[in-house]
Image (cartoon, grey):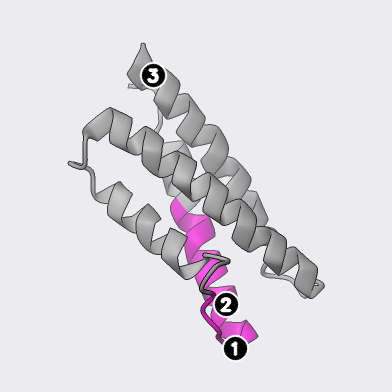
């Protein structure tokens, strides 16, 4: 039951992050990107915690989500051109889509 509940939490959080990352591809005010960094920090930390509850560090997805957490962190921000951020946002959105709709599907 705990595993199924963790999968549902990961799925919902991944869908939220996927939508936020897709929206970030468009030209938006700088405040949205600050919001995205904070939301990414909170949501990816939550996903890592739930992935750990499921697999105890035996899952490659924990590593990928940790990398996304580092790239999008608001405390020590990475500085890149907007076009590079669009690529990262798209890749992250695709990954969170995979996590929500493939990795966390009903088994």
The answer to whether residue 57 is above or below residue 21 is above
Q: Residue at x 58, y 42 (%)?
A: 15
Q: Secondary structure at mark 1?
A: loop
Q: Which residue is mark 2?
A: 85
The answer to whether residue 8 is above or below residue 67 is above
Extent of the magenta region? 77-95
Can residue 81 be found in the magenta stretch? yes
User: Where residue 93 sits in the image (x, y, percent)?
Assistant: 53, 57
Q: Residue at x 31, y 48 (%)?
A: 62
Is residue 65 among what the camera can see?
yes
Q: Which residue is mark 3?
A: 4
In the image, 91 versus 29, the foreground residue is 29
Q: Is residue 85 left or right of residue 36?
A: left
Q: Is residue 56 left or right of residue 100?
A: left
Can residue 83 be found in the magenta stretch? yes
Label placed on residue 33: none
User: Where residue 92 sits in the image (x, y, percent)?
Assistant: 49, 61
Q: Which residue is mark 1?
A: 81
The answer to which of marks 3 and 1 sits earlier in the sequence is 3
Q: Secondary structure at mark 3?
A: helix
Q: In whole angstroms, how far apart are the C-alphas of marks 3 and 2?
A: 33 Å
Most extreme residue toward the top is 1
């Amino acid at each position: 039951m705990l595993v199924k509940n963790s999968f549902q939490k990961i799925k919902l959080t991944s869908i939220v992050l996927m939508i936020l990352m897709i929206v970030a591809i468009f030209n938006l005010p700088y405040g949205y990107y600050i919001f995205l960094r904070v939301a990414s920090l909170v949501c990816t930390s939550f996903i890592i915690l739930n992935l750990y509850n499921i697999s105890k560090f035996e899952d490659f997805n924990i590593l990928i989500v940790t990398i996304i957490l580092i790239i999008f962190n608001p405390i020590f921000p990475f500085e890149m051109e907007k076009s590079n951020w669009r690529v990262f946002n798209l890749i992250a959105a695709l990954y969170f889509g995979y996590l929500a709709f493939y990795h966390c599907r009903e088994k």
